[in-house]
Image (spheres, rainbow, N blue to C red):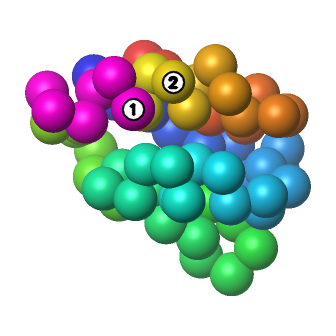
């Protein structure tokens, strides 16, 4: 599984970084993905962030 963050859409709320810190971190006011391929143990969390991002800035694929 791969995810990406659209930096033009991200509002920097930090939900993804606080809920799924093994996948996301904040780079200033924008969330970024730590790794290209998400490990199997972090896939569920990453998939949940795709659903929970308040502005749909996180995409799977």
Looking at the picture, tell me which residue is in the foreground, 49 or 29. 49
- Quarter of the picture containing the C terminus is top left
Magenta segment: does it hold 26?
A: no
Residue neighbourhood size for the residue with mark 2, other residues' Cα within 10 Å, grouped as few (<14), some (14–19), many (≥20): few
In this picture, is 10 found above or below 12? Answer: above
Q: Quadrant of residue 49?
A: top right
> Magenta segment range?
40-45
| In the image: residue 34, left or right of residue 54 | left
Q: Residue furthest bottom?
A: 28
Residue neighbourhood size for the residue with mark 1, other residues' Cα within 10 Å, grouped as few (<14), some (14–19), many (≥20): some
> Residue at position x 39%, y 32% from top?
45
> Residue at position x 34%, y 23% from top?
44
Q: Secondary structure at mark 2?
A: helix
Please say if the residues under marks 1 and 2 sit with CB atoms less than 8 Å apart: yes
Q: Position of residue 33 (x, y in %)?
A: 44, 53
Residue to which mark 2 is pinned: 48
Total labels drawn: 2
Looking at the picture, tell me which residue is in the foreground, 18 or 12. 18
Q: Secondary structure at mark 1?
A: helix
Principal secondary structure, stretch drawn in magenta: helix
Q: Position of residue 56 (x, y in %)?
A: 76, 28
Q: Position of residue 8 (x, y in %)?
A: 82, 50
> Residue at position x 51%, y 24% from top?
48
Residue to which mark 1 is pinned: 45
Q: Position of residue 32 (x, y in %)?
A: 53, 59
Question: For the residues marked 1 and 2, what is the alpha-carbon distance in whole angstroms?
Answer: 5 Å
Query: Do we see residue 33 in this rendering?
Result: no
Tag of residue 21: none
| In the image: residue 39, left or right of residue 23 | left
């Amino acid at each position: 599984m791969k995810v990406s963050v659209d930096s033009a859409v991200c509002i920097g709320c930090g939900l993804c970084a606080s809920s799924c810190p093994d996948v996301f971190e904040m780079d200033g006011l924008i969330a970024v993905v730590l790794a290209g391929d998400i490990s199997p143990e972090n896939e569920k969390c990453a998939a949940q962030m795709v659903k929970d991002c308040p502005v749909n800035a996180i995409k799977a694929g």
